[in-house]
Image (cartoon, rainbow, N blue to C red):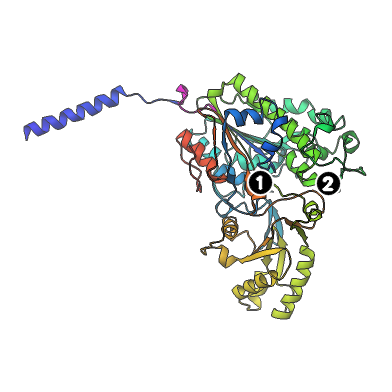
Amino acid sequence: MKLRTIILFSLLSVSLDAQTITKPVSQQQNIQPKLIVGIVVDQMRYDYLSKYYNKFCENGFKKLLTQGYNCKNANYNYAPTYTGPGHASIYSGTTPAYHGVIANDWFERNTGKIIYVTDDQSVQTVGSSSVKEGKMSPCNLLASTIGDEMRLFSNLKCKVIAVALKDRAAILPGGHLSNGSFWFDSESGNFITSTYYMKRLPQWVTDFNSRRLADKYLSRPWNTLKPIEQYTESAKDNNPYEGLYKGESMPVFPHNLPAMFSKTNYEILRSTPFGNTITKDIAIAALKGEKLGKGEYTDFLAISFSSTDYIGHKMGPQSVEVEDTYLRLDLNIAEIITFLEQSLGRDNFLLFLTADHAAAYVPEELIDLKMNAGYFSYKVFSDSLKGYLNKTFSDSNLVSKIMNDQIYLNRQLIKQKNIDIKNLEEGVASFALKFDGIANAYTSYQLNGATLQNRSAQMMQNGFYIKRSGDIAILLEPAWLDDYSLTGTSHGTTYRYDTHVPLLWYGWKIKHGYSSVPVDITDIAPTIASILNITPPSASLGKPLF
């Protein structure tokens, strides 16, 4: 017994000695990167990387591809694929079914109003005299983000900053605990924020706004970066599948930006590649002004390039305008990478680049090429649906709203009339299948918990949040779009042309390589959490990639 006690005491002593000798390693010794940089390109198809590769410079996209790691088969795992849900999913590591951001806006049954994703009437604009542009916050985002978890882990000592032209592209990546999310105000030409974050702009943002870069970028026409005859990857500059800028009769270069711009309306900047340039400018100003990557804990900078989306919607993926935008964006990204390498060193930052969704080819062009494509009229569908409801249920007012490819039923009226809502949903879904252009329709009973085998159905289920989504979700046929415009393109479906996006990694401990193994966009946040050895975001369902 005495010998056993001595042995146990000796083992305990050895254990205590080991604990005394082994010192914990702090972040100051660079076990984690000093800075995470997330770059999201709005509406970027994966194939743009190869399509424009030969024209990229050496230090932008090409550097990420030749020296970084390329996840070649990264896809969104839900629908609809829009900007708001995309940014929320990237940074929360989960889908709209859990983070609640089902679209850029949605119908609220209780009030009968349309809710914008980042709308918050309880806060005020900071940085300009605009009333509504700053009434924004992440209040509708239900889950935490990777930035939130970094802030919590560090007891709010690390910094999280987010910048973009679009408010939702700055607010959702920044999360609830962002030190500052800043977006572009088209009324003033300033980058602004809201009282959710702060009472006044940081001095570095005030100084940035005083440079009046928006005036500079809109003071000259937009011409091509290279001689236009070199844009062989694109269609002819003048073709019938592109939209027109204000005051133009043909969709051709040069675009006379000074004629479209006034000192009280900077909206046109968004639809030019110089919207991306000014986003690059404020991103570098943030790195300097906030001294990101210089503190005790890992900081985070989220950058979203939005002009690619505006230009893509107007012109379509085969346009010279889109190609020129990506060649210029390539230079912007090169400038960011070069600044990071010079100020921090490649081994001290981790950068990822992805997109919030991709885009379809212009259906009108595909139709002319005798491919399956088309335009679906929700106006015609809505009128026909009212007739069906009146005939079958004796009331044509049982639908409150149709938006985001979803049908919201008038639940209050349905209850008053004692109509079986499940039977009604099934009837509407069956009725929808009679229309050309509709591939399938799913009821809320199917999307809210049923085991669905079809890939598209599962993706729509991942995008379904019963408190905000409609009662019937419609899936259009491949290459079919809403008929709001017969030029340009859009996105939102479960098809690969909308879901397949780039996912490139570069910097801290990233070895060059690539993989075609399927990767979900919701894997990004858990990967960063694993690298930082912190808890993933609250509703995260992705897996670490490395």
Q: Which residue lies at the image location 70% right of the left edge and 64% below the top edge? A: 438
Labels 2 and 1: the sequence-earlier one: 2
**Looking at the image, can residue 323 be seen?**
yes
Above or below, comparing residue 6 to residue 432 in the picture: above
**Proximity of marks 2 and 1: CB atoms separated by less than 8 Å:** no
| Displayed quadrant of residue 433 | bottom right
Label 1 belongs to which residue? 357
**Looking at the image, can residue 195 be seen?**
no
- State the SS at label 1: loop
Q: Quadrant of the N terminus?
A: top left
Label 2 belongs to which residue? 242
Mark 2: few, some, or many residues within 10 Å (few <14, many ≥20)? many
* Of 296 and 451, the residue lying toward us: 451
Query: Which numbered dot is residue 214?
Result: none
Residue 262: image location, x then y, percent: 88, 36
- State the SS at label 2: loop
Q: Residue furthest front?
A: 370
* Of 265 and 219, the residue lying toward us: 219
- Give the residues drawn in magenta, as a range: 27-36
Q: Is 508 positioned to the left or the right of 362 in the image? A: left
Above or below, comparing residue 404 to residue 175 in the picture: below
Foreground mark, 2 or 1? 2
Give the residue type that dot 2 points to: Glu
Q: Is 301 positioned to the left or the right of 539 in the image? A: right
Give the residue type that dot 1 points to: His
Q: Which residue lies at the image location 67% right of the left edge and 35% below the top edge? A: 163
Q: Is 28 part of what is drawn in magenta?
A: yes
Q: Is 423 positioned to the left or the right of 124 in the image? A: left
Residue 31: image location, x then y, percent: 45, 26
Residue 264: image location, x then y, percent: 85, 37
Q: Is 459 part of what is drawn in magenta?
A: no
